[in-house]
Image (cartoon, rainbow, N blue to C red):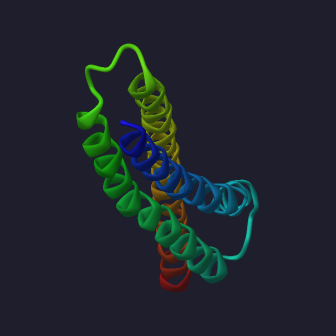
Amino acid sequence: EAKDKADSVNSIEGLGAQVAALEARLSKAMPAVESLLVSGSPGHERVKLLDEASKDIVSLQESSPAVLSSIKRSMDTVRMALKGPNAEVRSRLIRLTARIENLQQSCEKQADALSTERRRIAALAHIQVRDSLQAHVR
């Protein structure tokens, strides 16, 4: 039983490190996304920055299900533990699940915000092209 607990703790620590790495990547990406949404950078440069930020967020969104799946597999081994050493393992796995789900929600919000900003930039560019063509025709 002690060996099983040690294996579980090692597994949880590995999963915790993976979740922490994803959270660090999100923390690194968030300021860039937020500054993009607030600043008024020029068109082409802004689109390039939007693309980079979107790639970061999409990468996080693609990585998080694998980690969540690993957490859920570990959870299956201790699902019914209410007392004893496995109860602590179960509790830590539940906290990791909550952290990864929170990360997924944050990524989704950022992806939606970037998509909205991209549509806004495209609409502004369309208006500028239309106005230029109308001015040229006159």
| Closer-to-camera residue (101/75) | 75
Is 41 placed left or right of 20 in the picture?
A: right
Residue at coordinates 52% horizontally, 68% vertically from top-left? Answer: 56
Residue 35 in the image: x percent, y percent? 74, 59
Residue at x-position 42% and y-position 22%: 87
Q: Quadrant of residue 21?
A: bottom right
Left or right: where does residue 95 sit relative to residue 25?
left
The image shows residue 45, relative to residue 34, as above or below, that is below
Displayed quadrant of residue 62: bottom left
Camera-nearest residue between 116 and 96 = 96
Q: Residue at x 43, y 67 (%)?
A: 59
Where residue 65 appears, x then y in whole percent? 32, 53
Q: Point out the residue furthest to the top here.
A: 82
Q: Quadrant of the N terminus?
A: top left
Residue 47 coordinates in the image, percent (x, y): 56, 75
Check the image and report above or below for 14 versus 74: below
Left or right of residue 66, residue 37 in this image: right
Count of marks placed on residues: 0
Q: Is residue 72 above or below residue 133?
A: above
On screen, residue 25 versus residue 69, left or right, reads right
Between 20 and 34, the one lying in front of the other is: 20
Does residue 136 lie above or below 94 as drawn? below
Q: Nearer the viewer, residue 13 or 66?
A: 13
What residue is shown at x 55% (from left), y 76% (from top)? Answer: 52
Residue 135 point in image, percent of width and height: 56, 78
